[in-house]
Image (tube, rainbow, N blue to C red):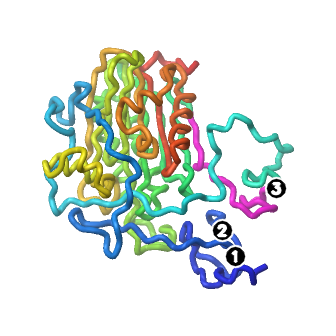
Amino acid sequence: MMSQMPQQTALSRCPSCEEPLESGDRFCGACGYDLSAVPARPDDSPTIALNGAPPGGTWPQVPHPPAERHLPTDLQGTESGDHPLPRSGPVVGSPVSPASGVRFDRTPEPDEYLLQAPDPRMAAEPPTPAEGVKVCVACRAGRVDHDGYCENCGHAQPRERDHMEQEAGSIAAVSDRGLRHHRNEDAFTLGNTLLPDGSPATFAVVCDGVSSATRPDDASLAASRSAADTLLAALPQGTHPQQAMHEAIVAASRAVNSLANEPATAREHQPHQNAPACTIVGSIVTPCLLVVGWVGDSRVYWVPTDRTSPPARLTEDDSWAAQMVAAGLMNEAEAYADERAHAITGWLGADAYELDPHTASFKPDRPGVVVVCTDGLWNYAEAADEMAQAVPADAAVRPLHSARVLVGHALDGGGHDNVTVAVVPFPTPPQGAGSA
């Protein structure tokens, strides 16, 4: 059998996940990649200077055209520092400076992976195996050994983070690996707590690992957990929700920075790569206040229950395109049509130029839902109107179902990235209320 795979002898690393290989390996021990058919090795997408181009390479293609945009100012709010949000431009962003950093947030991926994450659109469940027996999700026949590989076809089984769902009282979130990535580099955390006056507060934190960095999955997980711990400690003590969100982002940044100080052996044996990095976005909902905070290009959308009222996007991306528009160098259509549009200019990580947490507070005058998501979703529903059309009408009372529907929307659109979405009803329902 080995004579049929002469190209394997020249491989020292898996072409999918870059894990070291041993002589005679037929499948990658880390991701289960089939080494009998090795595709051409993709070019790297390096971190670049703002005004530079990747050495010897081309800018990555952006799959979606510019769409109508709804800015945070579409819903009146207050930005960091208790200043009214300006109506003449984006909430964040500054004139482009050569000192500012910009990086691509993903690396090239194969068109398809043979073993996909569980698909939340699947209605039929596979036959229930005998108690204590795990059956391969790829061939549906082989037993899964203790190391997580099928004894029949050799495939590595989906990891726990490939598809995650959580419902916490009235809020819910779903995260999926998508159809093109070999692992899920997103993470989320949900929380419920009480304010000093006894009123409830709910929050959702969503983080998107920067794929071109080292250990993006560890970065997103550390950031989401640290931010949640900070919110759970600050809100019951009476810290204003907007200040609590700021502190949570700072704590998340420290958690990601600390990963860069770990030994090289913890860096997937690639100490030459840049530091772990991720984006972060979160929302806090109290009975009368909605607070959002972010660094990067993950987003928060407001979708009112009464769909005759306009929805709105409540965050502004830290991206190349947003900076071009803020600097007056391009209009929105020109900037978002450029191949560099979605290169990010803000992230959490030891190699970030500076930490600039963005927060804003709003007081909606009607009920609705807050959609907190990574670009794996909004790439397929970029404008606020498009997102509102994708959100089920009963999202406020069925948040988990709605999160599943939104993940399915992204997978139906192509699933080119990891996709994570949290659905948070506004106003916060009484403590103990759950989804119907």
The disc placed on residue 248 is none
Q: Secondary structure at mark 2?
A: loop
Using residue 382 as the reference point, say whether residue 185 is left or right of it.
right
* Dot placed on the residue nearer the N-terminal end, 1 or 3: 1
User: How would you rate the neighbour count of disc 1 (Cα within 10 Å): few for under 14, some for 14-19, many for 20 or more?
Assistant: some
Determine if residue 346 is in view: no
Residue pictured at 54% horizontal, 55% vertical: 180
Q: State the residue in front, 104 or 214.
A: 104
Instruction: Indicate the position of residue 105 as horizontal and vertical percent values.
Output: 38, 57
Q: Which residue is mark 3?
A: 143
Distance in Å between CA atoms under marks 1 and 2: 8 Å
Q: Residues within 10 Å of mark 3 (few under 14, many from 20)?
A: many
Q: Quadrant of residue 360?
A: top left
Instruction: Of the two numbered discs 3 and 2 on the same chain, state the one appearing first in sequence.
Output: 2
Three-letter amino acid code at disc 2?
Gly
Q: CA distance from mark 3 to mark 2?
A: 17 Å
Coordinates of residue 361 in the picture (x, y in percent) = 27, 29
Q: Mark 3 falls on what kind of element?
A: loop
- What's the residue type where badge 1 is placed? Asp
Q: Is residue 406 magenta?
A: no
Q: Compared to 366, does 86 lie above or below?
A: below
For the residues bearing labels 1 and 2, Cβ distance under 8 angstroms: yes
Say left or right for 157 vs 426: right
- Circle count: 3
Gap between marks 1 and 3, in whole Å? 20 Å
In the image, the segment drawn in magenta is: 142-166
> In the rendering, which numbered label is found on residue 29?
2
- Where is mark 1, residue-wise? 25
Q: Is residue 5 visible?
A: yes
